Amino acid sequence: MCTRGSNQALLGGPATSPLGAMRVVASLAVLVMLVACGTSPEVKNQRVEYWQRKLAHDLHIGMPKSEIDAWAESNHLKFTLQYSKSRPQLVTFAEEVPGSFSPLTGCKGWHIMIYLFLSESDLLTRYLVRDDAICL
């Protein structure tokens, strides 16, 4: 719509009326509250760091799978053997970090996952701790 030379008072709209401006501000406030009430990642980050430190302390590159299996059992972890690009890897769900439900994202927490990558001779080559959001 071209407004050059038009009477601005006749060009009504949500931003030009006080009620429309209040609606815009109220909508933005609700959006900010929804985002702010979503799950805080602070606890999740602490748990990811815990598992990263634990793996760095307990496991070492070149560790045989038999020792990894014994470590997993003593830590009450059940790994599943998977193959990625024909390379073996062990994957487990370490824990769930609950959070408050966010209607904006549809998420309610995180799963902490551990990935142990093995060589063809079943020796540890690297590890990874990942967090996956739990969403509807």
Image (cartoon, rainbow, N blue to C red):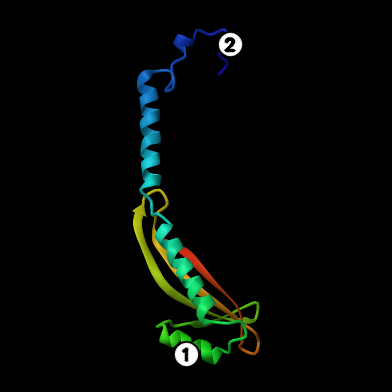
Q: Quadrant of residue 125?
A: bottom right
Q: Position of residue 2 (x, y in %)?
A: 58, 16
Q: Quadrant of residue 9?
A: top left
Where does the C terminus fall, quadrant-wise?
bottom left
- Depth check: 112 or 26 in front? 112
Q: Position of residue 35 (x, y in %)?
A: 40, 46
Can you see residue 133? no
- Graded by Cα atoms within 10 Å as few (under 14), some (14 to 19) or many (20 or more), the crowding at tag 2 reads few
Query: In the image, what residue type sits under mark 2?
Result: Arg
- Residue sitting at 51 percent across and 78 percent down? 57
> Which residue is disc 1 drawn over?
70
- Depth check: 82 or 117 in front? 117
Q: Position of residue 86 (x, y in %)?
A: 65, 81
> Which residue is disc 2 drawn over?
4
- Residue sitting at 55 percent across and 89 percent down? 65
Where does the N terminus fall, quadrant-wise?
top right
- Residue sitting at 42 percent across and 57 percent down? 42
- Depth check: 75 or 113 in front? 75
Q: Residue furthest bottom?
A: 66
- Residue sitting at 47 percent across and 14 percent down? 11
* Helix, strand or loop for disc 2: loop
- For the residues labelled 1 and 2, the Cα–Cα distance comes to 78 Å
